[in-house]
Image (cartoon, rainbow, N blue to C red):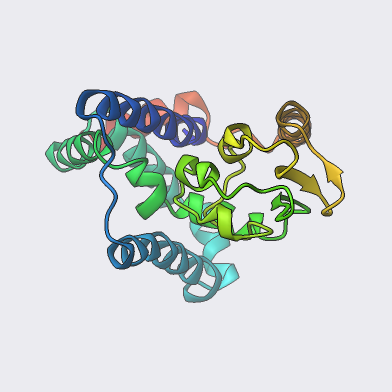
Amino acid sequence: MGALGGDQKAAWPFLSEILWRLGSRLTGRTFTPPFWLDLLLRSLKYAILAFFLWQLLFAMPLPGLQAFLSSPYHMMADVRMLQFFLAPGPILLGFLLVFLILALFVQNPWCRYLCPYGALLGLVSLTSLARITRDPTLCVRCNACSSRCPAWLPVMIKTTVRSPECFACYRCVQGCPAPGALEMKLLHRVRLPAMIFGLVLLVLFLSVDLYGRSQGRWHNAVSDADISVLIRESRR
């Protein structure tokens, strides 16, 4: 069931990107909210993240959290969540429909405005040793980098991109017409081509995944037989 949630987190950005590209081709443009509205909407995902962190770290004491995780109620809640996605009700379907339509006109609305997981990754990325850097002496100030940024960051006026909204997609670097003007660098010194950066991230991901599997941390404590029983009980 944990894998189900992980698959959905991975699938939604991919689907959102496809819909945005489709909408851009159909309409010939992408709707960009005013700066004040975009800033207000972007703050929502950080507010949602703060709410969840408050609930996990402060609202529920550690003994209470441990008791909840080992209780039958937690197992039933997990099954309910599985049913929520396997047999979606009208509220979930309506929510998905609204966002699917919105994704045709606004680039990545879920990731940009509501995803708390994306907000968490963005805040963690602020500690990254690798960043997009701009050399003002080589920059021709054509604004190609800023116009290609899916996060709508003003890359052209920055020497170093420090923002939780930057997810290192390399679009600004690949679209720069001035060689060496815009690059991803490690510690502001070592140039990181897109292929090398991608391989580093892949190795890190696989290392964490293999470590978790070797320690048995990716396995659900609830057996398949218990899940079947809980599903039958929940339908009564």
Q: Is residue 154 left or right of residue 219?
A: left
Residue at 87%, 50% in the rendered image: 189
Residue 13 % position (x, y): 43, 34
| Relative depth, front residue between 104 and 14 | 104
User: Number of numbered discs present?
Assistant: 0
68 is higher (above) or lower (below) than 174: below
Is residue 236 at all visible to an observer of this figure?
A: no
| Relative depth, front residue between 229 and 37 | 37
Residue at 69%, 52% in the rendered image: 134
Q: Is residue 185 left or right of residue 91?
A: right
Residue 36 % position (x, y): 31, 68
227 is higher (above) or lower (below) than 49: above
Q: Is residue 162 left or right of residue 90?
A: right
Residue 172 % position (x, y): 57, 40
Farthest residue in the right direction?
189
Residue at 38%, 60% in the rendered image: 42
Residue at 59%, 69% in the rendered image: 62
Is residue 12 at all visible to an observer of this figure?
A: yes
Residue 224 % position (x, y): 48, 24
Q: Quadrant of the C terminus?
A: top left
| Relative depth, front residue between 144 and 53 | 144
| Relative depth, front residue between 51 and 155 | 155
